[in-house]
């Protein structure tokens, strides 16, 4: 039982460190119309696809992940609306694309 608890704790710490490193590289909150953003959902909430559908935004990059999708802001309230519709984070997509060489 203790080995299972140890493995679970290790996975949780790794997940938190991974998320923390992404957030730490975030220099600013994207807020301008036309900004590319990465919408990140929580594992237990609505999917990024569902969040974009609720916010009436579209995918803007052909590659996606189970917990993240790129989109482009089309009005000033999009970041607020994405978060209200279940986004865990709304990250600067241009900066992340540069870091990942996309």
Image (tube, rainbow, N blue to C red):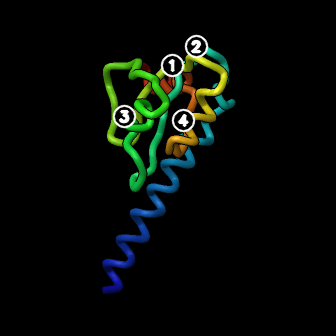
25 in relation to 63, above or below:
below
Q: Residue at x 38, y 37 (%)?
A: 50
The picture quadrant where one finds residue 12 is bottom left
Gap in angstroms between the C-alphas marked 1 and 4:
11 Å
Foreground: disc 4 or disc 2: 4
Q: Is residue 34 left or right of residue 58?
A: right
Sequence-first tag of 1 and 4: 1
Q: Secondary structure at mark 3?
A: helix
x then y, percent, for residue 37: 53, 26
Q: Secondary structure at mark 1?
A: strand
Residue 34 numbered tag: 2
Q: Residue at x 30, y 86 (%)?
A: 1
Foreground: disc 1 or disc 4: 4
Residue 72 numbered tag: 1
Instruction: Point out the image quarter for the C terminus.
Output: top left
Q: Secondary structure at mark 4?
A: helix
Q: Is residue 55 left or right of residue 44?
A: right
Sequence-first tag of 3 and 2: 2
x then y, percent, for residue 57: 46, 23
Q: Do labels 1 and 2 touch, CB within 8 Å?
A: yes
Q: Do labels 4 and 2 touch, CB within 8 Å?
A: no
Sequence-first tag of 4 and 3: 3
Query: In this figure, which residue is indicated by the disc labeled 4?
Result: 82
Q: Do labels 1 and 3 touch, CB within 8 Å?
A: no
Q: Residue at x 39, y 52 (%)?
A: 43
Sequence-first tag of 1 and 2: 2
Q: Do labels 3 and 2 touch, CB within 8 Å?
A: no
């Amino acid at each position: 039982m203790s080995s299972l608890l140890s493995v679970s704790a290790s996975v949780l710490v790794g997940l938190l460190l991974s998320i923390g490193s992404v957030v730490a590289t975030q220099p600013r909150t994207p807020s301008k119309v036309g900004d590319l953003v990465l919408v990140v959902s929580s594992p237990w909430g609505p999917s990024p696809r569902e969040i974009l559908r609720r916010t009436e935004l579209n995918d803007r990059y052909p590659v996606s992940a189970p917990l993240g999708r790129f989109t482009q802001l089309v009005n000033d309230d999009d970041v607020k609306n994405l978060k209200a519709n279940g986004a865990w984070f709304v990250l600067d997509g241009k900066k992340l694309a540069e870091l990942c060489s996309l």
